[in-house]
Every structure is written in C-alpha cells, then in structure tokens.
Image (cartoon, helix red, strand yellow):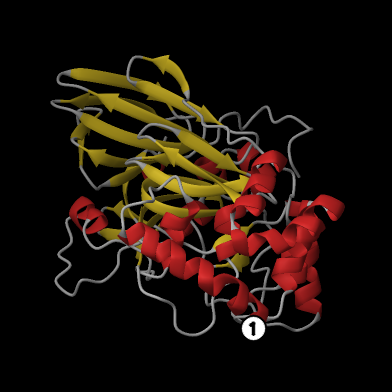
Amino acid sequence: MSNRYSILKLQGKVQHYDWGGYTFLPELLGIKNEEKRPFAEYWLGVHPTASAYVAIQNGWKPLQQLIDEEPDAALTPALRQKFGNIPYLLKVMDVREMLSIQVHPSKENAIAGFERENQLGIPLNAPHRNYKDQNHKPEAMLAISEFWLLHGFKQKEQLQQILEEVIEFQILLPLFRKEGLQSLYRFIMEMEQQSINDLLLPLVKREIRQKQEGLLNKNHPGWWVAKHFNDQHPSGDIDRGIFSIYFFNIVCLQPGEAIFQGAGLPHAYLEGQNIELMSNSDNVLRAGLTKKHIDVQELLANTDFTPIVPNILKGQSRRDGEQVFHFPISDFSLTHVLLNSDTSFEDKAISPEIWVVIEGGVIINQQLVVKKGEAFIVFPGQSYQFLSSGKTSLYKAFVAIPDAYSQDEEN
C-alpha cells in the first residue's frame, strides 16, 4: 500500500459557536485563547464546510482531496459504492451553554425536503432553508465529563404529573388528556408569542428565585430554565423552547457512557464535554432555545412523539482497555481505547478510521508519535500497533462492516 493511504496525522477545524467553552478545547489543542473566544466544537471529517487536513511530505492537504485522488484506496470499493465518501463526522465538543432544541430528518425526508427547497429556489446558505443536503443526521455521543442533555419525550404518566404540578401548565391538562402529546406540542409551538410570554413569565421568575435559594438541582427542569436566563429575570419575549425543558427527559451521562439519537428524536445538549459522532450532514430542524429559523410545520412533520425511556449505552468490551459502541445504523461506530504504562494495542483497519487523542500519547508502528489533542487517520487495510508510556485515552470513528451491510437498516 502507498504511504499516501497508510497512517497520516489529521488537523481538524475549530468552530467558535457562542455556546462553547473557553478552556477545554484550547487546552486540549494547545491553543492560547487570550481573546477568550468560545471554542465549541473540533471537527474531524470531510464535511464540505470544514474538511480536515492530512499531513503530507511538504505540508498539509485537504483530506477530501486525498480521497478524491484514489477513492477506492481511501474508502474501499464497497464503502465507496454505498456512501460515496467517509459517511461520518467526528467532533470533540465543549458545551458551556444550552444548544437549540432540535430534530433531524430521516434520509427519505431529507431527500424530499432538499428537492422541494431546490425547486423553490431557496439558496443553500439562506437562513430560512431547512435542508442543506440529502442525508440524514443520526447522532451518537460519548461523555468525556459528566454530561447533561434533553433526550426525547417523557413517559405519559411523567408528563401528566408535570402538567398537574406546574401551576402555569395546568391549563394545558384538558388538551393533553383529550388529544394527547402531539396535539399538546403542536399547540404550544403554534401559540401566539404574547400568550407564551403571559404563561411562562411567572414560571421563569419563580424558577430563577428557587435556584438562587438553592432549592433546585440539575435534575429539575427549573434549574436549566434559570441557567438559560443567567439567573436574571427575562426582558422581552420568552423562548417557547422552555416548554420542552419540562416535557423532555433530562439525562445525565457519566464519563464512558453513550447515547444515540436517531431521526425524529427531539433533543438538546445542556452542559459538559463529549465525543460526538454523526452522519455527514447539516440538516437541523429547530424547536426553540435559539435565534435561528424555526419552521414549525416542518418540525412537527419530522418529530417522533413516542415517549421513551433513555437508553444509556455502556459499550462492549472487545479486549482489555477497549470499549466498542455500535448503533442502529451502518454509517458509523465508535471505540474508546484506554492504555496504561507500557501497554500496547494492535488492530487492522477495515474502513477509514479517524482517531483523536484526548489524554497521553502513543507511538504508532514505532514510527509516528501522536500526543494529546492530535488526530490521525488510518486507511483501510493498514495494520497498526500503539505503544504507550503512560495513561492514554483515544477515540476512534469507523464503519463497522463495510463489506456486509444488511438490507433492513434505516434508509
């Protein structure tokens, strides 16, 4: 195999979204942040807006360019035929402030929505465009720190209890009892803004006061409501996304725990650091806690209103120090490798593998040194051995079975 498609260092792209933290990613990547810019995400993949770069003899080259030069060598013929490219995007995230409440479409709906908006002549970069591509965007995340998120609708009994206990929500009980969750959610998403303000302002003020008095913890929706407003009474319109904080499951993941979020599942990240792995797409339908475009009808058409019990994943131990996480799609899998002093790790890539080192460092095949904050790609067919002289934590994104895809997976 050519050295061009063996093991190469990668350089990703930092995204400076407002909700990002100020220290975790700069310290990981060895970047000074004297301007105190928010470092939200570090992207590693071939997304067209931020392709990673690979180290070559004379500098750096876009990973996408290297793939385009010899796609069969970079991807394998089977993976190229099924996906056309690396089908996943790997991110390291630092969530300081809550992200928008969102839903992602199925692949079928993404194709239809993309075609529809093209026919309407909506530019791809238009702020009111819903579909930026024809792909679905299932997501998985693995906690690095304690990580909090909203994940799917509560069970019917839990939601009814919330509607009964929160004084401002009691007016919604008859609708919920008669017509169910979907009608309730449609009602609040279509409610006039003044009615939202009138209903939620007393609730928001009460939750802020209770948080300041130490009466709430992070398992209570009110804690996150107060945080959203920075413990200050709101001025102006109140975001209708506040309802979702009460209606969705609040989940706390411990380091090493993962969760999967498929098409239609409403969710929002609240706080913490994680490794996120998603299909290579930018299709997002928002429901609140954002200043960005909200298309209520498109959101409702793509939302799964089935109440769920969150499924927290622990992974499968393949060998000592290795936890593998498989998900109900063929686009990606995730591995966490934890090495100690003088331990080694050996394997062979069956698909393009993108790795990132979060702690420590390794020597690869007694040639390439990769340290904390650095990333690399292993191309298909390449064997490798890691040697570590201390505690080292690495994460790998890959496609699990590129030559044996089943026919009944999600479209």
Q: Give the x, y percent position of residue 304.
A: 74, 50
Element type where label 1 sits in the image:
helix
Q: Is residue 62 above or below residue 394?
A: below
Specify the quadrant of the image occupied by residue 307: top right
Query: Does the rendering let one see residue 89?
Result: no
Query: Which residue position holds label 1?
Result: 194
| Nearest the eye: 287 or 139 | 287
Total number of numbered discs in the rendering = 1
Residue 249 as seen in the image, left or right of residue 119: left
Q: Give the x, y percent position of residue 295.
A: 70, 73
**What's under tag 1, amino acid-wise?**
Gln
| Nearest the eye: 113 or 308 | 308
Q: Is residue 174 above or below residue 159?
A: below
Q: Give the x, y percent position of residue 268.
A: 52, 55
| Nearest the eye: 214 or 368 | 214
**Which residue appears farthest toward the top when viewing the image?**
319
Specify the quadrant of the image occupied by residue 342: top left
Residue occupying the point 37% across, 22% down: 322
Residue occupying the point 48% across, 49% down: 149
Q: Is residue 112 above or below residue 116?
A: above
| Nearest the eye: 361 or 225 | 225
Residue 169 as seen in the image, left or right of residue 175: left
Name the quarter where the C terminus is drawn: top right
Residue occupying the point 31% across, 35% down: 394
Give the class, few, some or many, for how many residues have Cα within 10 Å of label 1's Cα (few <14, many ≥20): few
Query: Does the rendering let one see residue 254?
Result: yes
Name the quarter where the N terminus is drawn: top left
Q: Give the x, y percent position of residue 248.
A: 60, 50
